């Protein structure tokens, strides 16, 4: 994926995700499959993981070669109360973090995007690879939200 494509993908998914934060409460209670996260929980997850990836990217940019941590998404969902966390907080977190990520893509010299870090599950990653993973992660959960909204789940 080229820089312009990645920028377009992350910009488009930002606006798509932000539109879901404004859904009526009954739509945020829907799920994409029985026993799976609700739209509200998926949005909280997107907000938190956006912050996580922003931190990881920032750390790799400032401290090339550093180690970054893994995240247990299911534990975060329970322990950080995704089911009840205020939607406006999630929206603001997501929007701010994604804005910073987009700034990095637009403003940083190409060589900065090749700086490396080490992840305990993924191994060595470049900033560029982290940005691609972020784009894929967002698309994955936006597809789940679309399924939930279309009535594909039991919720």
Image: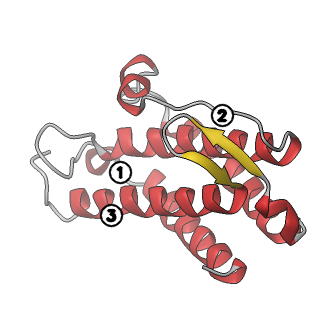
Closer to the eye: label 3 or 1: 3
Going by the image, does 146 lie left or right of 86?
A: left
Closer to the eye: label 3 or 2: 2
> 29 and 116: which one is in front?
116
Nearest to N terminus: mark 3 or mark 2: 2
Checking the image for residue 24, the label placed there is 1
Closer to the eye: label 2 or 1: 2
User: Dot 2 surroundings within 10 Å: few (below 14), some, or many (20 or more)?
Assistant: some
User: Dot 3 surroundings within 10 Å: few (below 14), some, or many (20 or more)?
Assistant: few
Image spot of residue 17 (x, y percent): 49, 59
User: What colouring method underlies this structural image?
Assistant: secondary structure
Checking the image for residue 137, the label placed there is none
Nearest to N terminus: mark 3 or mark 1: 1
Image marks 3 and 1: residues in contact by CB distance under 8 Å? no
Q: Quadrant of the N terminus?
A: bottom right
Image spot of residue 47 (x, y percent): 54, 43
């Amino acid at each position: 994926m080229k820089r312009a494509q990645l920028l377009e993908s992350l910009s488009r998914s930002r606006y798509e995700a932000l539109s879901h934060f404004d859904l009526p409460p009954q739509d945020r209670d829907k799920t994409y499959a029985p026993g799976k996260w609700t739209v509200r929980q998926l949005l909280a997850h997107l907000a938190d993981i956006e912050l996580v990836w922003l931190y990881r990217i920032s750390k790799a940019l400032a401290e090339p070669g550093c180690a970054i941590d893994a995240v247990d998404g299911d534990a975060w969902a329970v322990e950080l109360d995704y089911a009840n966390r205020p939607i406006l907080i999630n929206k603001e977190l997501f929007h701010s973090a994604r804005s910073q990520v987009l700034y990095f893509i637009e403003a940083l010299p190409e060589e900065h995007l090749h700086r490396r870090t080490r992840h305990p599950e993924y191994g060595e990653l470049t900033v560029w690879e982290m940005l691609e993973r972020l784009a894929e992660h967002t698309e994955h959960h936006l597809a789940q939200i679309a399924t939930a909204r279309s009535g594909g789940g039991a919720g």
